[in-house]
Amino acid sequence: MSATKVDAPVLALDGPSGAGKGTIGQICALKFGWHYLDSGAIYRGLAWLAHDQNVAADDVSGLVNLVDAMVLVCHVRENDVAQIEINGQMVTDKLRTEEAGEIASQIAPIPEVRASLLNMQRRCRKAPGLVADGRDMGTTVFPDSEFKVFLTASAEIRAQRRFDQLKAKGFDVNLARLLESIQARDVRDSSRATSPLKAAEDALVLDTSDLTVDEVVTRILNLVN
């Protein structure tokens, strides 16, 4: 890696879709003054690029070429969702659709794609520090990170959260379909051979089903401090 642990500490936030990683991660990044990496945006960004440029989800070489040319920046602002910029274009809302999520889940298990994206993510580790959220930040991408947290919640709670988010943005979504999609994605992510979704052995596991955002942030701040 280009930076040492002393120069660039990492807070690795892992967990399934809808567990609150994005919200919690952005708040922590702002409080620490650290950089922020939404690894889900990287996979969704690649999914969007593939769809936009007519690269099939099973076209391994085509996907790797997209990764090599992709420049992604996560802009974090107070009281706002992270704005995702890819190759100079703001694409935040385009990455949050069900279609982008499904394509991202299809391409995520491909070893060659993951290897390219792994290098891309590790380059984000810069001083004064990095808050990285995803599914394998603490187990695969930054296994030597000082601070690891695994956030989880029931599938029903997570589906309702995603439903509320998408409805607030004006998307026409179906709660039952979202629940089915989340449950199916959980199975795929947890059972894949490459970097399956699981808590690191040394991670703090937090079930956010009955916790407020402030309560979760406070526990993480206590861990880091």
Image (cartoon, helix red, strand yellow):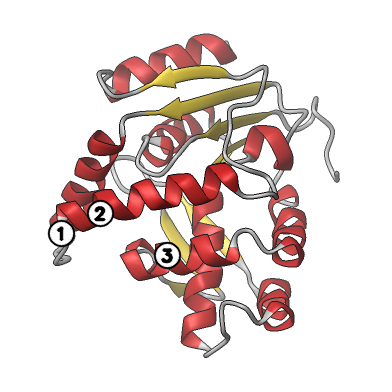
Placement of 195 over or under 118, stated as above or below: above
Residue 187 % position (x, y) = 47, 46
Q: Quadrant of residue 107?
A: bottom right
- Who comes first in sequence, dot 3 or dot 2? 3
CB-based contact (under 8 Å), mark 2 and mark 1: yes
The amino acid type, in three-letter code, at marker 1 is: Asn
Q: Which residue is mark 3?
A: 102
Q: Residue furthest bottom?
A: 54
Residue 106 % position (x, y) = 53, 65
The amino acid type, in three-letter code, at marker 3 is: Glu
CB-based contact (under 8 Å), mark 1 and mark 3: no
The amino acid type, in three-letter code, at marker 2 is: Leu
Nearer to me, 90 or 190:
190
The residue under the point 67% across, 17% down is 202
The residue under the point 44% across, 12% down is 219
Kindly report the distance in space between the C-alpha atoms of the residues bearing marks 1 and 3.
15 Å
Q: Which residue is mark 1?
A: 174
Q: Quadrant of the N terminus?
A: top right
Q: Which residue is mark 2?
A: 178
Q: Secondary structure at mark 2?
A: helix
Nearer to me, 114 or 2:
114
Q: Secondary structure at mark 3?
A: helix
Q: Quadrant of the C terminus?
A: top right
CB-based contact (under 8 Å), mark 3 and mark 2: no
- Who comes first in sequence, dot 1 or dot 3? 3
Placement of 87 over or under 133, stated as above or below: below
